[in-house]
Image: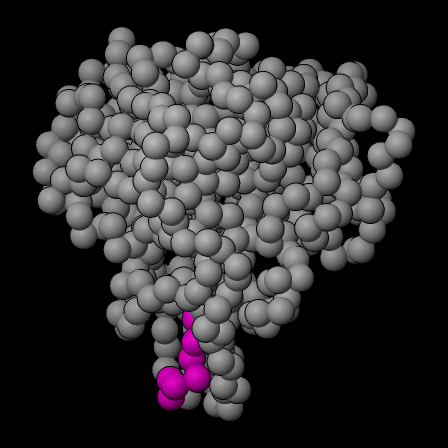
């Protein structure tokens, strides 16, 4: 293995990652495997390892990525994506029993988290379960989620940003009977897209330098790359588009927030959020997707004339001009102060309409999903998003591996209202807040500043969510039921620079 393969190297903070690959394969097998009574319907091998992919013209780019194979079950369970760092796509069905043999072949401790999935404590990829380079971890769980677009990525403490940036992330698509009954576009009309920003040097190597916020006294704003990529490419082209498509979008960026719209400014039709199908299609002028959020679109070309072109555009959101002076516009700046131009609106999926479109009818109803209930008097907890000692925190605290505070203990089966309040700091930034082991409902947003109110039209707050973007100044109330599993789970900011710096806590369910 040549040297370039093993460092995707010019990663900032690379002290911990420089040096030779210390792994000895099979050095340690950590297994949360339940018992030999678990008979999987599907068994996969999933390896995180250094690789090279051709992302840009010229030199290939050294990345870390997941590769895998199906050991048992349908071959389509695992679908690699050619010439990309993202992937493979995993396809499961509700009710399947899944075993995944994860092997860590990157030169850092790591563990895999199945983002949005409702799995037992030791299957969730908590940082205390990291395996060293060369180690292995065996996951066994039953797929309990409804159909939807979920994903997987590393979750070690302190290195998640680096490892995701290196390329470790893939989609996990769940299907079920209810979804099949809707007859949404399938096959090559079902298009999963991972949006992620990256910066490259002149030799096509990945560059990772987190940006400090101007005036933020050392507090990390995050990473803002110069290029926006779709499944690792500059853009995806669909030269013979007819009829309707289902486009699944994941914002897999470390920190960037996007506004997604059609190039012809026709409204978008959203059909699913983080946790699967909405009750019914919703027309939106645009979508706003923070890191880790998903949105699915019904994209219809049957009334476009042959030859016309329509793009989906991702515009990086810049909070600098929205009355949040301390933001200083850094959201739109690329490349961590390397003098790069800010990434502008980027057409990432280009559809050229062909003749002969079948008309496919948008279903009026998509799924059985109760309306968001009125806010009620359940047990309410408030989590203030805070800034102290140059670090982001939650209620003034930062992550400690096994620590759970008295106000972070939840009763199994309880329904609670959690409020994330983003108003305690003058140095306000949007924070995409993610809670493990639940799919929640967004009850209300309170106090959205007038300058940001326009963004609310782009949120998919009507659906099930596991990550919610809390704008500067807002209090967002969430309704959640803790009936997945007992144990220790995480809640945290999914701006990975914030998460790695400690804007993450445990909560326990007992
Ligand atoms: Cu944050």
Percent across and percent down for residue 260 are 33, 57
How was this image coloured? one colour
Q: Residue furthest right?
A: 36
Q: Would you place residue 257 above or below residue 498 in this image?
A: below
Residue at position x 25%, y 37% in the image: 471
> Does the image show residue 45?
no
Residue at position x 49%, y 80% in the image: 361
Q: Would you place residue 180 above or below residue 425 in this image?
A: below
Asked whether residue 54 is drawn in magenta, I would say: no
Percent across and percent down for residue 322 are 13, 42
Locate the C terminus by quadrant. top right
**Along the horizontal axis of the image, is 422 left or right of 290?**
left
Residue at position x 48%, y 16% in the image: 409
> Which picture quadrant has residue 424?
top left
Residue in front for this viewpoint, 167 or 39? 39
Q: Would you place residue 30 above or below residue 3 in this image?
A: above
Percent across and percent down for residue 18 are 54, 18
Which SS does the magenta portion mostly show?
Answer: loop
Percent across and percent down for residue 442 are 36, 43
> Does the image show residue 355?
yes
Q: Residue furthest bottom?
A: 356
Locate the N terminus by quadrant. top right
Q: Which residues are magenta?
A: 299-305
Residue in front for this viewpoint, 481 or 424? 481
**Along the horizontal axis of the image, is 376 left or right of 3?**
left
Residue in front for this viewpoint, 325 or 120? 120
């Amino acid at each position: 293995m040549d040297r370039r393969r093993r460092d995707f190297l010019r990663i900032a903070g690379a002290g911990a990652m420089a040096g030779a690959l210390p792994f000895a394969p099979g050095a340690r097998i950590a297994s949360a495997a339940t018992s030999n009574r678990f008979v999987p319907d599907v068994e996969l091998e999933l390896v995180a390892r250094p690789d090279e992919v051709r992302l840009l013209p010229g030199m290939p780019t050294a990345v870390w990525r997941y590769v895998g194979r199906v050991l048992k079950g349908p071959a389509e369970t695992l679908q690699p994506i050619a010439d990309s760092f993202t992937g493979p796509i995993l396809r499961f069905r509700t009710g399947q029993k899944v075993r995944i043999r994860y092997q860590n072949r990157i030169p850092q401790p790591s563990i895999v988290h199945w983002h949005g999935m409702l799995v037992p404590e030791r299957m969730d990829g908590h940082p205390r379960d990291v395996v060293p380079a060369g180690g292995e971890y065996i996951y066994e769980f039953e797929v309990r989620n409804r159909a939807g677009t979920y994903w997987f990525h590393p979750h070690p403490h302190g290195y998640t940003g680096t490892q995701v940036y290196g390329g470790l992330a893939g989609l996990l698509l769940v299907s079920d009977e209810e979804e099949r009954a809707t007859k949404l576009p399938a096959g090559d009309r079902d298009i999963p897209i991972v949006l992620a920003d990256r910066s490259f040097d002149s030799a096509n190597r990945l560059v990772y330098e987190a940006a400090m916020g101007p005036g933020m006294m050392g507090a990390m704003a995050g990473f803002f790359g110069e290029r926006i990529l779709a499944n690792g490419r500059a853009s995806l082209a669909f030269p013979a588009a007819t009829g309707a498509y289902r486009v699944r979008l994941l914002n897999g960026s470390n920190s960037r927030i996007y506004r997604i719209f059609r190039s012809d400014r026709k409204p978008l039709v959203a059909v699913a959020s983080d946790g699967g199908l909405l009750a019914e299609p919703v027309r939106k002028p645009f979508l706003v997707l923070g890191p880790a959020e998903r949105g699915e679109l019904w994209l219809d070309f049957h009334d476009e004339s042959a030859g016309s072109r329509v793009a989906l555009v991702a515009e990086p959101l810049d909070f600098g001009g929205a009355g949040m002076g301390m933001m200083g516009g850094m959201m739109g700046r690329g490349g961590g102060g390397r003098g790069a131009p800010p990434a502008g609106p980027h057409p990432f999926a280009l559809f050229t309409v062909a003749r002969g479109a079948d008309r496919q009818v948008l279903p009026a109803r998509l799924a059985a999903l109760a309306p968001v209930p009125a806010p009620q008097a359940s047990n309410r907890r408030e989590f203030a998003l805070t800034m102290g000692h140059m670090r982001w925190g939650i209620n003034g605290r930062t992550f400690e591996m096994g620590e759970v505070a008295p106000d972070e203990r939840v009763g199994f089966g309880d329904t609670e209202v959690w409020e994330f309040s983003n108003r305690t700091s003058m140095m306000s930034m949007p924070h995409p807040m993610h809670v493990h082991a639940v799919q929640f409902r967004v009850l209300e947003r309170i106090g959205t500043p007038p300058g940001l109110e326009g963004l609310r039209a782009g949120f998919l707050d009507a659906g099930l969510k596991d990550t919610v973007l809390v704008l500067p100044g807002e209090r967002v109330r969430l309704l959640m039921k803790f009936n997945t599993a007992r144990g220790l789970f995480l809640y945290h900011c999914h701006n990975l620079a914030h998460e790695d710096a400690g804007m993450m806590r445990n909560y326990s369910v007992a």
